[in-house]
Amino acid sequence: MNPIPSVPWLRRIMAKTALALTLFLGGAPAWADEAHDDSFFIQQVQQRYVEPFKAGDIQGWSSAFAEDAIALHNFRDADRGRDAIRAFGEVVHQTFALERYEVTVTDVRHQGRWAYTVGAYTSLLVSKLDGAEPFGLQRGKFVLLWEQTEDGHWLIALDMGNSSE
């Protein structure tokens, strides 16, 4: 019996996650690449993820994701692929005003062509239709799994966040 389910997208993300965890736990040597310190990845989160989303630049925000990325957010099923993630971002900005959106990176781990950023967020979404706050003030945590492409760019392979409340 195969321990990994036969759902193709799930097999891919599980394989990538297993590889990344193996590397982070010291199971394989690092690939040769440019050295990046924590500030590089913190900057990636702010400039490619937080700032565009805050500004409503969903095209710019979604360009930080790999074509086959997976996003796992509160109150919804997984968004699979950059196009689905972009559609999610568009709906959020069409439906809600981002009254508050703060992201703080607390941990960075990098080895070879893989990195993850972990942190905390605070958000408040206000309905553009009636001013309601359907989720209230949300405080939570997130992890972004980054993969370096063959041409040296870093893209988000997995975006997962959930409320701590």
Image (cartoon, grey):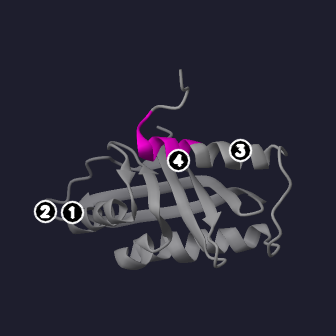
Which residue does the image show at 62% across and 71% down from the upper left? 149
* Residue topped by disc 3: 21
* Residue topped by disc 1: 95
Direction left: furthest residue:
129
Check if mark 1's residue and mark 2's residue have beta carbons within 8 Å: yes
Q: Residues within 10 Å of mark 1 (few under 14, many from 20)?
A: some
Q: What's under tag 3, amino acid-wise? A: Leu
**Marks 2 and 3, how far apart in space?**
43 Å
* Residue topped by disc 2: 129
Q: What's under tag 4, amino acid-wise? A: Ile
Which residue does the image show at 33% across and 65% down from the upper left? 83
Of the two numbered discs 3 and 4 on the same chain, state the one appearing first in sequence.
4
Q: Main secondary structure of the magenta part?
A: helix
**Marks 1 and 3, how far apart in space?**
37 Å
Q: Is residue 93 above or below residue 151?
A: above
The answer to which quarter of the image holds residue 54 is: bottom left
Of the two numbered discs 2 and 3 on the same chain, state the one appearing first in sequence.
3
Of the two numbered discs 1 and 3 on the same chain, state the one appearing first in sequence.
3
**Marks 1 and 4, how far apart in space?**
30 Å
